Image: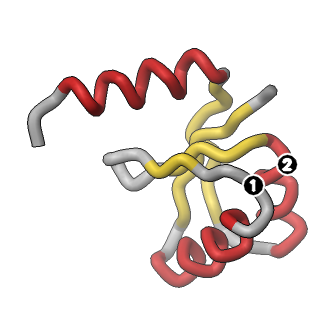
Amino acid sequence: MKLAKIRFESDDACGRALKGLATRMTVTVLADESFIVPESGVEWLRSEGLPFQVLEWVNQDYVVQTLRDNLAHSV
């Protein structure tokens, strides 16, 4: 499955997008205020005309490693 690491251009767009995405699929929120969504999420965001930026395309291994790395650091 292809996954995209994305960032929203505004808090308003982020709020509207997360509301729609969360009812349709799994969304992973990272500590750097970026999000990981499946390819279908990117397609949905585009169809809704919500402004966002694709930072990079990633795979499941990247997501797992990123979440493990964030857990290893003290808060």
Decide which of 10, 29 is in the foreground and name it: 29
Q: Is residue 52 left or right of residue 33?
A: right
Rendered location of residue 67, percent (x, y): 40, 30
Question: Which residue is denoted by mark 1 in the rendering?
Answer: 25
Relative to 41, residue 49 above or below: below
Rendered location of residue 64, percent (x, y): 50, 23
CA distance for labels 1 and 2: 9 Å
At 67% from the left edge and 46% from the top edge, which residue is drawn? Answer: 37
Q: Which part of the image, by quadrant, shows the N terminus?
A: top right
At 30% from the left edge and 23% from the top edge, which residue is drawn? Answer: 69
The part of the image, by quadrant, that contains residue 71 is top left
Which structural element holds mark 1?
loop
Q: Earlier in the sequence, mark 1 or mark 2?
A: 1
Relative to 63, residue 55 above or below: below
Residue 40: mark in rendering:
2
Rendered location of residue 41, percent (x, y): 78, 53
Tell me if mark 2 has few (under 14), some (14-19) or many (20+) residues whose alpha carbon lies within 10 angstroms of its own: some
Rendered location of residue 52, percent (x, y): 63, 61
Q: Which part of the image, by quadrant, shows the C terminus?
A: top left
Three-letter code, disc 1:
Met
Q: Are marks 1 and 2 in contact (CB under 8 Å)?
A: yes
Q: Nearer the viewer, mark 1 or mark 2?
A: 1
Which structural element holds mark 2?
helix
Three-letter code, disc 2:
Ser
At 29% from the left edge and 32% from the top edge, which residue is drawn? Answer: 70
The part of the image, by quadrant, that contains residue 20 is bottom right
